[in-house]
Amino acid sequence: MDVVVVGAGLMGSQIAVEYALAGHGVHCLARHPGVTQERVGSALGTVLRLGLRDEADTSAAAARITVGSMAAICSATS
């Protein structure tokens, strides 16, 4: 299953990580994609640091997450 997280702020980026760790492809749409990417990286780092998953799992999850701009989507539909 592929998942789209619209509004991938603090909570949305965490949701994206949970789905990616479960094996789903995730696309995040955010106003500030760079910030979302940092939050996703931080969340995956926390998972790794706490020993909840190993490095192979967190790397695979990171590869399943893409981040895009909501502005690009909104302007395309206007």
Image (spheres, rainbow, N blue to C red):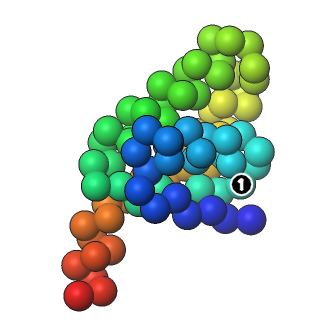
User: Picture quarter containing residue 72?
Assistant: bottom left
Question: Pointer 1: what residue?
Answer: 24
* Residue at 55%, 39% in the rendered image: 14
Task: Report the side of 57 relative to 37 (left or right).
Answer: right
Residue 75, relative to residue 50: is it above or below? Answer: below
Residue 27 in the image: state x and y as whole percent: 52, 59
**Exactly how many numbered labels are in the figure?**
1
Q: Measuring 59% from the left and 45% from the top, which residue is drawn there?
A: 15
* Residue 45 vs residue 14, the one in the foreground: 14
Rendered location of residue 2, percent (x, y): 67, 65
User: Residue at image x 66%, y 30%?
Assistant: 58
Q: Relative to 36, is 25 on the left or the right? A: right
Quarter containing the N terminus: bottom right
Q: Amino acid at mark 1?
A: His
| x and y percentages locating residue 77 in the rendered image | 30, 86
In the picture, which quadrant includes the C terminus?
bottom left
For the residue pair 27 and 56, the one nearer the viewer reads as 27
- Position of residue 33 measured from the top left corner of the image (x, y, whole percent): 32, 49
Q: Is residue 22 above or below residue 46?
A: below
Q: Residues within 10 Å of mark 1 (few under 14, many from 20)?
A: some
Q: Secondary structure at mark 1?
A: loop
Q: Is residue 35 above or below residue 67?
A: above
The residue located at (65%, 57%) in the rendering is: 25
- Residue 39 sits in quarter: top left
Q: Is residue 78 above or below residue 60?
A: below
Q: Residue furthest bottom?
A: 78
